[in-house]
Image (cartoon, rainbow, N blue to C red):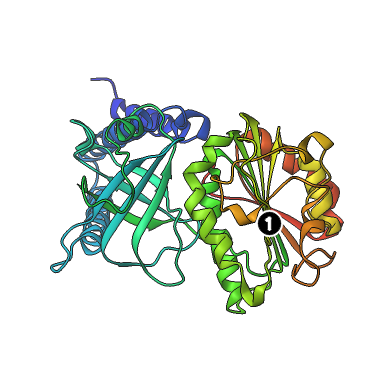
Amino acid sequence: MPKNLYAVIAGSCLGLLMLLSVPVSRKPSYEFFLRTHQVLALACAYALWRHLSPKSLIVRICLYISTGMFGLTSLLQVCSILYRNVSFQRGFPRARVTKMRSGIKVTIMVPSRLQIEPGQYINLWIPSISFWSFLQSHPFVVASFADGEQTTLELLIGPQKGLTSKYLRNSINIPDSASGDLRFALFSGPHGVSAPLADFETVLLVASGLGIATQLPYLRHLIRGYNNFQVGTRRIHLVWQLDSLEDGALAQDLLNQALKEDTLDHGYILCISVYYASGDAKPGLLKEGQHRRVSLHPGLMNLADLLRAEVAGVGSPATSREEQEHSFDEKMLVQEELVGTGPNVSAELDPGQARAGKKGGRMLVTVSAPNDIRDKLRELLRTYLDESVSLLELEYQP
């Protein structure tokens, strides 16, 4: 046997692990990345064991200590999963997989209360989805939010290849209130770190597609904090880019909850701009309401105009006459919050009730969107270095 063969094998496995950990390598297929990572890790551990076993006593002691630490951390992780998932009174978690017009919503009823911070995610395991699903778990960001502990978690999922496509095939079309088709599930977490947003006076949330799932908890956290006098934020602007207007149905209920919560002293700090690249809203259904905080814009968002308007404190940028005359479907969001896309949103707000619209204070831009949008934001924000504007790329990126 060639000398140091196992050392070469272990080093090669470590090198492949590093290459596969690059986002470009792991994003196309999460299942392939996960299984390859596990196989390479086991192969590396075995090769190290064979390479070091005949060596001196001190080397073997270090190897035994490393193996023991790995076993201990694995045991602690199993104990944590059991603690989160097992209750003598309520049993195990149950999950309902519901098909929406543009994706999947998974509602998980957990047996014990769980503290979830904005931006955190869980690893979900539902063995009954398919034959091989008992070997697969996936990380999903938690889209629901509560001030305290939660007993129900909501996940928004865009079906891709692999396990999420099986979620779609096994989803149901009945309302969330239905009692049937609850599946046994287990989860680990919550994982991840929640970003601090409370010290910024203006927060611009930029999302594309399923990036809304990680922005929604931050949005509701800021609104709840403002209502309880716990944050310094005075203006929140959510900008959501969609491929099709129908895709907005996936987050409709959670957006409506945020709009209803933003009513302290009959005022509001939230406005929402939805941009859709294709599709038309049904004409003749819109009846403008009293708050008028939601605007729909056909086409792609103009990041330069949005940033310029927010830094200047004037709200959304001006839109064309064609946009002003566009009609929308009130079913996408609560009817009384929709407004035709007029010159700008801040001009539509009732005088004395909008708590923003004037320049001043620190501003934060959070983004959960594809690479091209993030690259554009980085380039644009270089021109606002003297305006106290910061950029935060959230942990989950669609």
Q: Residue at point 23% right, 56% down?
A: 93
Q: Is residue 242 above or below residue 316?
A: above
Q: Which picture quadrant has residue 42?
A: top left
Q: Which secondary structure lies at badge 1? A: loop
Q: Is residue 88 above or below residue 123?
A: below
The reply, left or right, for residue 281 in relation to residue 54 is right
Residue at the extreme front of the image, as rendered: 284
Q: Nearer the viewer, residue 82 or 162?
A: 162
Q: Amino acid at mark 1?
A: Arg
| Image location of residue 111, percent across then percent down | 23, 63
Q: Residues within 10 Å of mark 1 (few under 14, many from 20)?
A: many
Residue at the extreme top of the image, as rendered: 1
| Image location of residue 252, percent across then percent down | 51, 49
Q: Can you identify the residue that label 1 sits on?
A: 293
Q: Which picture quadrant has residue 158?
A: top left
Q: Can residue 398 be seen here?
A: no
Q: Nearer the viewer, residue 365 or 258?
A: 258
Q: Can residue 23 be seen here?
A: yes
Q: Is residue 349 above or below residue 307?
A: below
| Image location of residue 189, percent across then percent down | 35, 57
Q: Residue at point 63% right, 56% down?
A: 337
Q: Residue at point 44% right, 67% down?
A: 146
Q: Is residue 99 above or below residue 59?
A: above
Q: Which picture quadrant has residue 177?
A: bottom left
Q: Quadrant of the N terminus?
A: top left
The reply, left or right, for residue 117 in relation to residue 190 is right
| Image location of residue 34, percent across then percent down | 34, 35
